[in-house]
Image (cartoon, rainbow, N blue to C red):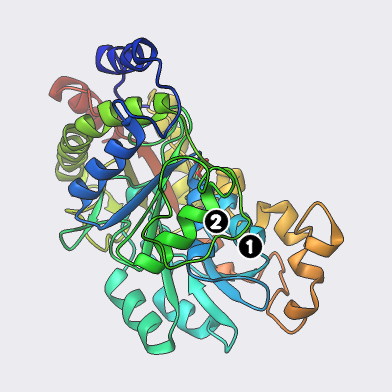
């Protein structure tokens, strides 16, 4: 969480005073207004605010018609929720390598495509944009949907287009650790009417036909789904947070650029697919060997600027996705995609060494987190300590 205060308190008070706590109301309609404001900011036609980033990923996959019999390609380095979202719709996550940008390697994405591949989830991890031109081109060639996981990259962009709007659909997380936050929350964005209708029905399948006239202009028939609806409190806080997004990003990027400039003679940094669109949350040093990375981290820790090696980030590394690696895909065998007849020929032969290249890259990088509120004196102290 970066910036939260009086504006969010006022937003919550506004909701309490209105007594309109439910999403569909005849008053301020905080959730619906947030969705409209998000669409305007991102330049996208549809958005749905919901309970979490994972809910948004699941709803996006449902929107694309992904289900049993389908493979969905995910990178070896992403939070476990990306892969679990695939199992939640009965499909199989196929794990592909990352490249020197620490995001999905387009070449390995293409290698992993089979006749079963229905979608790919490129993940803009730590605010680093994926190589979207190549990913979109390969996906188009093979008729594969692109669902961007921009959960860690809200507000970032790729070649001038906001992350989450470059593929067929995109997912944001607004949990506590994200660029803007309501403690928990997420959003799905898409220009595609069909994905939007299916996702909206899925994300709120019981109330959707009961409250308001939400299905009025729909061509999609209602089907059973989930309950990912949020209250007006989430909508109101997110409206206040959205107003702060660009200034948070501006300060993060300014501070990251300052450190990059001052340290670039001395260190290498990971390859960026678009440094201007990068969110600026993370400075990622890049070393020739694991030993050098370990030594740098030790020095940074001692200097009081703790470094993190991505290989040590637990559930962000595929080898630590315990229920996926153990193929425990559901709470009941009949719902378990790894046991479904429709999935028996699909690629779920997971082994700890299947993406060794990714593990090697994750061992050779070290992160320092950027503080948007740090002034030049603070940044100079980091520079002095790391030099
Ligand atoms: C890359 C990525 N995808 C998906 C998620 C899931 O988001 P949420 O925790 O809001 O469900 C996260 C959350 O940390 C994430 O980092």
- Labelled disc at residue 279: none
**Residue on which disc 1 sits:** 89
Q: Residue at coordinates 15% horizontally, 59% vertically from top-left?
A: 160
In three-dimensional space, the C-alpha distance between marks 2 and 1, rounded to whole angstroms, equals: 7 Å
Where in the figure is residue 380, as x and y percent of width and height?
18, 27
Closer to the N terminus: mark 2 or mark 1?
Answer: 2
Residue at the far right in the pictured view: 333
- Labelled disc at residue 58: 2
- State yes or no: discs 2 and 1 in contact (Cβ < 8 Å): yes
Label 2 SS: helix
Q: Is residue 75 left or right of residue 126?
A: right
Label 1 SS: loop
Q: Residue at coordinates 47% horizontally, 77% vertically from top-left?
A: 109
Work out whether residue 338 or residue 387 is closer to the camera in this orientation and state it. 338
Which quarter of the rendering shows the N terminus?
top left
Where in the figure is residue 9, as x and y percent of width and height?
32, 12
Where in the figure is residue 87, as x and y percent of width and height?
66, 61
Q: Residue at coordinates 46% horizontally, 83% vertically from top-left?
A: 110
């Amino acid at each position: 969480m970066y910036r939260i205060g009086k504006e969010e308190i006022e937003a919550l008070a506004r909701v309490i005073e209105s007594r309109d706590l439910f999403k569909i109301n005849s008053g301020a309609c905080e959730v619906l207004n947030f969705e409209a404001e998000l669409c305007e900011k991102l330049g996208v036609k549809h958005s749905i605010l919901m309970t979490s980033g994972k809910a948004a990923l699941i709803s996006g996959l449902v929107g694309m018609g992904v289900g049993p019999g389908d493979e969905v390609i995910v990178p070896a380095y992403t939070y476990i929720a990306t892969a679990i979202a695939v199992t939640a719709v009965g499909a199989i996550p196929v794990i592909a390598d990352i490249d020197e940008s620490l995001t999905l390697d387009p070449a390995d994405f293409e290698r992993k495509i089979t006749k079963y591949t229905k979608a790919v989830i490129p993940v803009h991890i730590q605010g680093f944009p994926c190589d979207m031109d190549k990913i979109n081109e390969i996906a188009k060639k093979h008729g594969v949907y692109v669902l961007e996981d921009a959960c860690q990259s809200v507000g970032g962009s790729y070649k001038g287009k906001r992350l989450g709007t470059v593929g067929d659909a995109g997912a944001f997380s607004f949990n506590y650790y994200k660029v803007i936050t309501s403690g928990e929350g997420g959003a799905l964005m898409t220009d595609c009417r069909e994905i939007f209708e299916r996702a909206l029905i899925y994300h709120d399948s019981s109330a959707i036909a009961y409250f308001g006239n939400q299905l009025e202009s729909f061509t999609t028939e209602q089907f059973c789904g989930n309950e990912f609806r949020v209250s007006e409190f989430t909508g109101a806080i997110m409206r206040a947070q959205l107003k702060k997004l660009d200034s948070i990003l501006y300060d993060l990027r300014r501070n990251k650029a300052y450190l990059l400039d001052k340290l670039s003679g001395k260190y290498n940094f990971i390859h960026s697919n678009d440094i201007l669109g990068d969110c600026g949350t993370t400075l990622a040093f890049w070393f020739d060997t694991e030993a050098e990375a370990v030594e740098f981290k030790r020095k940074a820790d001692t200097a009081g600027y703790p470094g993190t090696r991505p290989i040590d980030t637990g559930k962000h590394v595929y080898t630590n996705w315990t229920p996926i690696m153990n193929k425990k895909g559901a709470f009941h065998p009949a719902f378990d995609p790894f046991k479904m007849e429709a999935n028996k020929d699909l690629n779920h032969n997971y082994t700890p060494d299947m993406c060794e290249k990714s593990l090697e890259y994750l061992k050779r990088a070290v992160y320092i987190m950027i503080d948007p509120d740090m002034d030049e004196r603070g940044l100079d102290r980091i520079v002095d300590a790391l030099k």
